[in-house]
Amino acid sequence: MDFAIDFLFEPLKEIWEFPIFFVEVVVGGILTGVMYSLVALGFVLIFKASGVFNFAQGAMVLCAALTFVGFHELGVPQWLSLILTLGVMVALAFAIERIVLRPLVNQAPIILFMATIGITFFIDGFFQMVWGEDVKRLDIGIPKEPLEIGGVLVNTFDIVAALVAGTLVGVLAFFFQSTRIGRALRAVADDHQAAQSVGIPLQTIWVIVWSVAGIVALVAGIMWGSKLGVQFSLALIALKALPVLILGGFTSIPGAIIGGLIIGVGEKVAEVFWAAKIGGGIEDWFAYILALFFLMFRPQGLFGERIIERV
Amino acid sequence: MNFARIGSALALAAFVAAPFALPTAANAQANEQFIPSLSYRTGPFGPNGTPFADGFLDYFKMINARDGGINGVRITYEECETAYNTDRGVECYERLKAKGPTGATAIVPLSTGITYALIERTAQDKIPMLTSGYGRSDGSDGRVFPWMFTLPATYHSQMDAILQFVKSKEKGSLKGKKISFIYHDSAFGKEPLPVIQRLAKEEGFELSEFPVPNPGVEQKAIWLRIGRQIRPNYVIMWGWGVMNPTAIQEAAAVGFPRDKFIGVWWAGSEQDVTPPGDAAKGYMAANFHGTGKDYKFMRDIEATVIKAGQGTGEARHVGTVLYNRGAINAAMVVEAVRTAQERYGNKPMTGEQVRWGFENLNLSPQRLAAMGFEGFMPPLRTSCADHEGGGVVRIQQWDGKAWNWVSEWIEPNRAALRQGYEASSMQYAREKNITPRDCANQS
């Protein structure tokens, strides 16, 4: 009983006593959540347009960051490295469509999912073989000093990352909602065969969507890479995007953002105020618990499309 | 039953098996010492495992090139990729343990998880296991762990030494101070907990503990707690891989001074301080050997291996912290073989003979000078009961370009640590029904 009271009320008392600190934790959670959303967006794009859960999204983040830094280390200016890396990501999208996806058109989603697992291991291994497995420093000039705004500590880097993610979401939302290609992407996502029957070129659509996911991966790779250093572990941040997707829905771009914010804030508040009561280190699995909780009430996620099937 | 067909099959089997049998016969006569290399060049810890593996193998290459092997016995080796996974580590061990004319000389698992998985297997196979700077600290008690060697220092020694260093910076007293301990939430990270918890009571400092889930890419919550609420005098970190640069960046993000932040020796390499850039300036870490190339054995490696185009990896790794750590591990194995040869003769040594070598190592200042290790590591001496041998630790600080010493060699409180080792090893002995060796009767 004492433990229950301690577990439930002590943290609330602490929040009440230290409101500024609570705000700092929430702001930190929001800014971290935006970084998760950056990765989650790549998953959403491909799932939205092809119904495929792209297991390789984390590997694409690693591949994009490695290529960007790799070119730069060869003496190429950063702006040109960016362009060259975009080219590599588009070329990768072409290759994936031609070699892996095209032969699997109309196969069950689980087959395509397994194909993306194969792609993951290929990308992880191949790009590390090309660029090396060393930890690489990535400095894009964003200051990382702490700032105090109204007594609340925030980090300049996190604010810039949030702005970048916000801009990217705006562009993607416009692309999906207001362009012909965006509408075609959504049609393909609903039904491959029906989309093909009305003349939507499936192969082209897949190349476009994998290219866009590659570009999102590049942005995520640059932001996370300048935070952690460019190394294999970048591929693991995909694990941080999964609860975001479960919560926000696999088909919603705003869902990826809102989901990221809820997961970011939820795990930070839980870790800071509740973790010590049960031994600490809970933020990783707490994110999944939070996502599962939402799943019970909205299986399609907060913003996902409701699944209606005729039987 | 068709006996003719069975006879033909047996003849065919003998024919097929013959090429595999022949090298075994040849191996029995080969004047070679086989040393397996369990490495990890892939996966999340690959950036750290690669320079270590390069240094480990380059040292053997140097011994072969410079000295013609260990007293004329050439070293052979084979690398096996574990990806820092325990199951793959065990698989590598099983694959390599019987290779070479006398089987594996010693196993260097390079992972606390693999170490734990191999304790009983190495004892059964009579192969010494060197866990230099990782693994079980109580493995230093040779009475209970006859096949395990923790030289030159354990995590327990290291934690004791780090706290002595902090104490010296705090005018000789830790009473009333706050120390936060942030650790990888694994057997590795938890290993020094008994020491820091005991010393918190004895020294009177306030300890706060923060486990970080693997791999440690997100630590903002922990650092907000540390930097904005607890505001400790010092933070000590037991991290590995991406956890380390992330922690340094988050420390900077909450404005925690890096010169009050000390990492384990697995958080004190170039790989840890490169990603944070300037944010890592002032950060400190423990170490049990020198860094850089300004040692005779390093010059020999450069001359006989690197310049000869025989280097295992990229030349820029030579002289980095983890490359040098690979080299010191290799040197310990070589010296154990050399010591064993003094007793058993200049020929390939078996695992049992190498164990005797490990138990009777005497790396005196003269021997270190002969090895080209002068200034690289302090002397150490092992025994049947004491498999740690040295235990001294030094603190280094990153200035933005290089690691520099900021302490002398620190001798941990060996008596107190030994008590802890023995209590823990005896508990292990009871659980496993092991009768501890009587070291008084060991020759």
Image (cartoon, coloured by chain):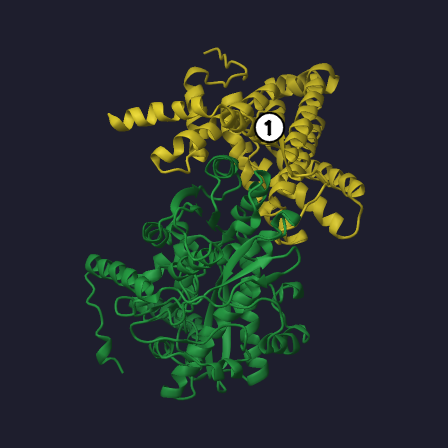
User: What's the amino acid at mark 1?
Assistant: Val
What residue do we see at 73% from left, 14% from top?
A178
Q: Which chain is yellow?
A: A
Front residue of B282/B66: it is B282
Q: Which residue matches tag 1?
A: A34
Front residue of A96/B274: it is B274
| For residue B296, side relative to residue A22 (left or right) | right
What residue do we see at 32% from left, 50% from top?
B201
x then y, percent, for residue A127: 65, 48
x then y, percent, for residue B134: 42, 60
Farthest residue toward the front? B171
Q: How many marks?
A: 1
| For residue A15, side relative to residue B58 (left or right) | left
Q: Chain of mark 1?
A: A
- The vertical placement of B291 against A149, above or below, is below
Q: Which chain is green?
A: B
Q: Secondary structure at mark 1?
A: helix
Q: Quadrant of the N terminus of chain A?
A: top left
| For residue B221, side relative to residue A196 (left or right) | left
- The vertical placement of B201 against B390, above or below, is above
What residue do we see at 41% from left, 21% from top?
A293
The local crowd at label 1, few if under 14, some if 14 to 19, many if 20 or more residues have their Cα within 10 Å, is many
- The vertical placement of A261 against B240, above or below, is above
What residue do we see at 35% from left, 53% from top?
B203
